Amino acid sequence: MARRKNAEAADAVPAVGSELATVGKGVVRAVGSYALGKALPYTPPWVAAAVLPPTAGFAVNQLWGDAAMSAGFASAGIALGGAALSAVVWKTGDGTTKVRRFRRVQATATVAASMGWLTCAVTAGPFGTPMLDIWLLGGALLAASWNARQIMGHGAGAEAEETNGGTMGKLAEAIGWEKVTVKSAKGTGKGTVKAQIEVAPSATIAAVQSTAGKVAAALQVPPSGVVVTPDPEDASRGTVSIRVADLLKDGVAFLMPDAFGLMPTEPIPLGMYADGELWAINPFAAAILQHVLVMGVTGAGKSELLRTLLAHLATRRKMSVFLVDLAKGRQTVGHMADGIDWLIQDAREAKRMLKSLPAAIRARGDVLAAEGLDQWTPESSLNALLVWVEEAADVVDFAELDEIARKARSVGMWLGISLQRATHNNISTDVRANLQGAICMGVNDPGDAGFCLPDSVTDTGAVPAWGSDRPGYGYATGMGIPQDRWTMEARSCLTDRTVLAALVAAAAPYRDPLDAATAAALGQTYAQRAHQGTNRLTPGIEQAAAAAAEALQAAIAAAPAGSVAVPAAPAPVPPAPRPVPLPAQAVPAAASAVPADPFEDDDMDDIEETEAMQIEEIYEEVLGAIPGDPEPDAPYAGLGLDDDVPDIDEDGAMSFEPQERMSTEDARHTLYAELDMWVSQGRLEFSPADLIPATVATGRQRPWLQGELKRLVESGVLQRDGHGVYVILHSPLQPA
Ligand SMILES: Nc1ncnc2c1ncn2[C@@H]1O[C@H](COP(=O)(O)OP(=O)(O)OP(=O)(O)O)[C@@H](O)[C@H]1O
């Protein structure tokens, strides 16, 4: 048994040996063929050096070498031809870069040396001394120098790719890149090739930028696939980035928040850049809160983007959202409406909200000043506020919006305007100038992108002129986005309705109600809002949220594969914050009931002139509001409001006691009761003429009404617009 094993082992040895030998041969063959493969491209100069000189030398010697006369003429001819050829080579060579200078010298030297040797070979023949030695040494040297040229052209040390020779030269000429040197082109591994470019002294990077479309066509990539960005440090240099593959074409997953209850100053993920990096904005953490303009044709993806933004904000604390969408508010965000504190779909309510914002801005400014803050930060007792308006031109007058945009920034009120085209008809230049953040999605006309994006972006070729063909794609600037990302194409997330609805419901216990100061300043317009979102104070919210949290897990599991991305390690959920009590001095005037007569303590002389003007204005308003006299021929037709009514019907059986004049307190109460009744009926707007019956009932006349209206405006109970319409912010009988 043992012997048989040994015999088997002995048999096995030669078998293993022969296998090893076979493997060894294979390795040698592989190494050999690898070396041959590597060396092959470098053999042509050696073959040429070995074959051409003896062949040409032998030929010329045989032809003209035996007769002195013909040999002389032939030598002279070859020498002259050689010199001319060398000159031509030198002349046509380009010496603008180090590599090009080397190539010119080398080509000229090769031609001159070869022709010189050939001249001598006419009489001496190719194989005698010293012709043979010169051929062997010189040929080897020249062949080696041509190998060096090959290595410089293609090897790792190559610094520059020539763009003005051969096919590249023709292409460069066609696209206007003759004066451009392209260096260090590298694939990013994420569908994009990046290269440094340098222009010759007479060219500019701006001229190169204008050719981006031609380059895209030549390379057969989308028009926006070529972006040329200037180097801010050196006007002759820049970067060209060519997107050769679209990583975003299958859609971008909605990235779930890291946790519930994050602060508004945390980054808000919106989607992904073409190079696979996260596209996020952080408006509330930026040094200056930049309002945003979102633009794109219908179907470009604006609503989808808004949903992602709102979904994240709805999971945060100290954050409130007002959204005006008259066209399709519920359709767009109905499933996440609970996360929106004030969703407005009615034009009159939208106007009232926008009119009450200046009072809220003032009140917030007072609170921040009392808290010792220059601008809103999470340390403030105020919530951050997003006011989003779809198609603003249909809702608001520009002067109003301009004021809001200018003043809202420092008080933590972020304004978002979404438009299909931000032309001068749709938005004033003043308002536009105040929207420093931009998200431009597909537009039909490349020129339209300039209404939204800065010139520095569109000049690079970053123009989303794809209409609605590529929904969700766009470019974004400002709002904390690093500047080198402004020219990088991005795509927003594609959201799932069920997931977002569950997310918003599950996050309700973390949402703070609007802070008291802002709510008070917005008054009845806010208190009586048609839609109210949920927050941690909504009765029964904890149980509803617990059920929603389970529904959220189920919705994520049921969502199409890859449509929702859940952070790898969710951060621990921070506890819901307790409201920070407002310092007494920070409570704005509008938050209290009508104060004591504001004129009592004031220095009347200082404001007399202003008041007189305002009273004059109101006087005109009241008179203008009184309807035309229905009985122009009546005996009392010419009477004014101040005139005593004469006893016209002297024989009349009926007579009236003169209206008894109420005390000031009672007169005010009558007026306030009228306003209070309107508030309780949901009527928040009126003209002065509407109060004439109440005024008459008090036994007072027009100037008294004028004074009272003015007093109510100053105390924050009413707000008056430029057209003489008053908005009731609070009932004067109920403290805000
Ligand atoms: N980021 C995205 N990824 C994939 N598809 C998207 C994306 N955004 C939008 N879409 C698709 O494009 C369609 C239109 O998008 P959306 O309604 O957001 O456009 P819009 O700009 O709001 O249009 P409108 O101005 O008419 O309201 C969506 O129904 C969706 O199918």
Image: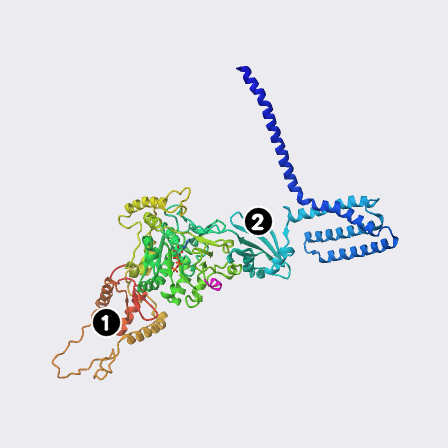
Q: Nearer the viewer, residue 293 or 317?
A: 293
Q: Is residue 478 above or below residue 136?
A: below
Q: Nearer the viewer, residue 654 or 232?
A: 232
Number of other residues with Cα within 10 Å of mark 2, as a class: few under 14, some 14 to 19, many 20 or more = few
Q: Is residue 141 visible?
A: no
x and y percentages locating residue 450 in the rendered image: 48, 63
| Alpha carbon distance from label 1 to label 2 | 81 Å
The amino acid on which the numbered mark 1 sits, given as a three-letter code, is: Thr
Give the residue at the far left of this rendering: 653
Disc sitting over residue 233 in the figure: none
Q: Secondary structure at mark 1?
A: helix
Total numbered badges shown on the rendered structure: 2
The amino acid on which the numbered mark 2 sits, given as a three-letter code, is: Lys
**Quadrant of residue 557 in the image?**
top left
Question: Where is mark 2, residue-wise?
Answer: 186
Q: Is residue 448 magenta?
A: yes
Query: Which region of the structure is painted magenta?
Result: 444-449
Q: Nearer the viewer, residue 129 or 550?
A: 129
Q: Is residue 32 above or below residue 389?
A: above
**Quadrant of residue 18 in the image?**
top right
Q: Is residue 560 visible?
A: yes
Q: Secondary structure at mark 2?
A: strand
Query: Residue visible at 59% across and 28% down?
Result: 19
